Amino acid sequence: MTVFAQESVSEALERGLKNAKHLRMRHAPAVAAARALARKIDAWDVIVDWALEDAAETKGARPAVPANDNVSIASFLKYLDALGLTPEDEAPAATPGRPATKPAPAAQPTNKVLAFRQKAQAG
């Protein structure tokens, strides 16, 4: 099992960028945006902690900033995908002692258009 170091999102991004041999200068804008988002994600926890501390001092007051950010991590993952830093091309390793799953049989087309498309995709 791989052991991952406890590090910030920015540090993990830099490690990924350093090991990505396929990236070129044309990727610079996406890299810059990913770095900005990584810094924002890393800073968000600190900002929320400050807001929660301020709210606790005023007994029951609502935090000055929202406690969650619903878009930064999703956007960051899209940048990683665009940069080719997500490992979706890798096939999962087979688990010893477990049979491999068989692909589901192809569904029979329900009309002539679907049959034509399926035949065209098959080559």
Image: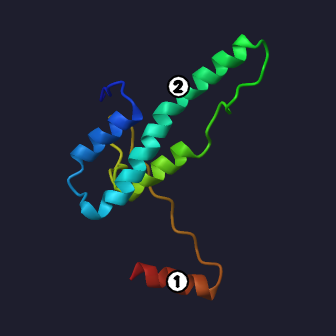
Q: Is residue 15 left or right of residue 60?
A: left
Query: Who's the residue at 54% across and 44% down the image?
Result: 72
- Is 55 above or below relative to 91? above
Query: Who's the residue at 49% across and 39% down the image?
Result: 40
* Residue under numbered circle 1: 117
Q: Secondary structure at mark 1?
A: helix
The picture places residue 5, in percent across and down from the top left corner, at: 32, 25
Query: Who's the residue at 39% across and 45% down the image?
Result: 35
- Quarter in which the C terminus is drawn: bottom left
Q: Is residue 37 visible?
A: yes
Q: Secondary structure at mark 2?
A: helix
Quarter of the rendering containing residue 58: top right
Q: Is residue 84 left or right of residue 54?
A: left
- Binning the other alpha carbons within 10 Å of mark 1 as few (below 14), some (14 to 19) or many (20 upward) gives few
Amino acid under label 2? Val
* Residue under numbered circle 2: 46
For this orientation, the residue located farthest to the left is 21
Quarter of the rendering containing residue 109: bottom right
The picture places residue 8, in percent across and down from the top left corner, at: 39, 30
